[in-house]
Amino acid sequence: MADQPVTLRTRKFLRNALLGRKQMVVDVLHPNRANVSKDELRGKLSELYKCNKDQVQCFGFRTQYGGGKSTGFALIYDSSEALKKFEPLHRLVRIGVTKKTERASRQQRKQRKNRSKEFRGTAKTKGAKKEKK
């Protein structure tokens, strides 16, 4: 199904010099197809605007009721340094520019914080238990 024709139309085009990017709303016409992957859209936008695929970011796509048309947002950065500087971390992880930092679960972090509060103001000894009355 990926060989079906896809038409891209951009509107509300804006050149944002402070953030080093071009930003636009993208309308994707994809008849006889459920939707188009963001990776494929990044490739088509990079050809359209003559830039590197790594500098294009697509997000927020919604398919219209009945199918055949999707609308979303696209950012085309002037350089990969600007992309890394201004894009949120979760979107950088999505396109594979950076890795997600591994950390303990939220519940484990809260339990660790509360356990450390029990020892506040006392001499830290290994395995000290709270006295029960």
Image (cartoon, grey):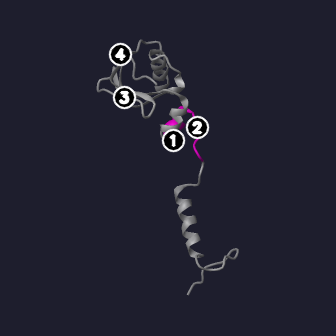
**Circles 1 and 4 in contact, beta carbons < 8 Å:** no
At 60% from the left and 48% from the top, the residue drawn is 102
What residue sits right under mark 4 in the picture? 31
Q: Which amino acid does label 4 sit on?
A: Pro
Residue 79 magenta-drawn? no
What residue sits right under mark 3 in the picture? 72
Q: Local crowd at mark 2 within 10 Å, few (<14), some, or many (≥20)?
A: few
Q: Is mark 2 on a helix, strand or loop?
A: loop
At 45% from the left and 20% from the top, the residue drawn is 45
Question: In front: mark 1 or mark 4?
Answer: 1
Between 70 and 58, the residue placed more toward the observer is 58
How many numbered discs sit on the rendered protein?
4
User: In the image, residue 47 lies at what x, y percent?
Assistant: 48, 15
Residues under labels 3 and 1: Cα distance?
19 Å
**Circles 2 and 1 in contact, beta carbons < 8 Å:** yes
Quadrant location of residue 25? top left
Q: What element carries label 1?
A: helix
Q: Is mark 3 on a helix, strand or loop?
A: strand
User: Which comes sooner in the sequence, label 3 or label 2?
Assistant: 3
What residue sits right under mark 2 in the picture? 98
| Span colored in magenta | 90-101
